[in-house]
Amino acid sequence: MNPLEVWESLLKESAENPIELETKTGLNFKLASGGIFLIVFESEKEPSSKLKSPRPIYKENFLKVFPYYEKWVAEEKGISKEITSITVNSVYIMAGIKYQLNQTRKFTN
């Protein structure tokens, strides 16, 4: 899937029901569609990300972070810092990308 397809799939799937996801460090959160953007919420599932308020994820930031996904998966040195400089929501974006790509692999294998 290309970055735009992953974005559109996450928007579509999370429009009906929020998606329960987990960051690389094991914190749970919910991802929901805000129509033209995604929204990160705290999860009822523990341990949960501690958010003062819901966080929007905009398409522009999502598409900027997406190319770093393979380096992030490979745990390339310094990559987390680099993508966090693009958006503080990078951990949530990467978890969403991972989820959607894994969903796609389930249906194509």
Image (cartoon, rainbow, N blue to C red):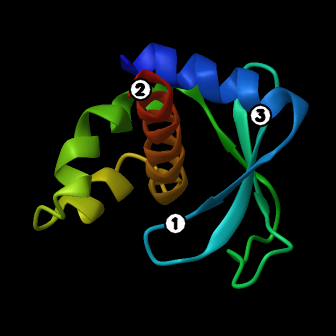
The residue that appears at 80% across and 55% down in the rendered structure is 54
Residue drawn where x is 60% and y is 76% of the image? 27
In the image, residue 58 sits, relative to residue 22, either above or below, namely above
The residue depicted at 55 percent of the width and 54 percent of the height is 92
Q: What x and y, as percent, mark residue 16?
A: 89, 30
Element under disc 2: helix
Distance from label 3 to label 1 (Cα)? 17 Å
Quadrant location of residue 80? Answer: bottom left
Q: CA distance from mark 2 to mark 1?
A: 19 Å
Crowding near pointer 3: few (<14 within 10 Å), some, many (20+)?
A: many
Which comes sooner in the sequence, label 2 or label 1?
A: 1
Residue 49: x %, y % from top left: 68, 74
Q: Which residue is mark 1?
A: 23
Q: What's the amino acid at mark 3?
A: Ser
Most extreme residue toward the front is: 109
Kindly identify which numbered label has been placed on residue 63: 2
Q: Earlier in the sequence, mark 3 or mark 1?
A: 3
Residue 104, horizontal then vertical, whole percent: 47, 28
Q: Percent position (x, y) of residue 109? A: 38, 28
Q: Residue drawn 28% across and 43% down? A: 69
- For disc 2, the neighbor class at 10 Å (few under 14, some 14 to 19, many from 20) is some
Q: Nearer the viewer, residue 36 or 15?
A: 15
* Real-space CA distance between mark 3 and mark 2, rounded to the nearest whole angstrom: 18 Å
Secondary structure beneath disc 3? helix
Q: Please state which of the two labelled residues, at mark 3 or mark 2, is closer to the viewer.
A: 3
- Residue tagged 3: 14
Name the element at disc 1.
loop
Name which residue type carries label 2: Leu
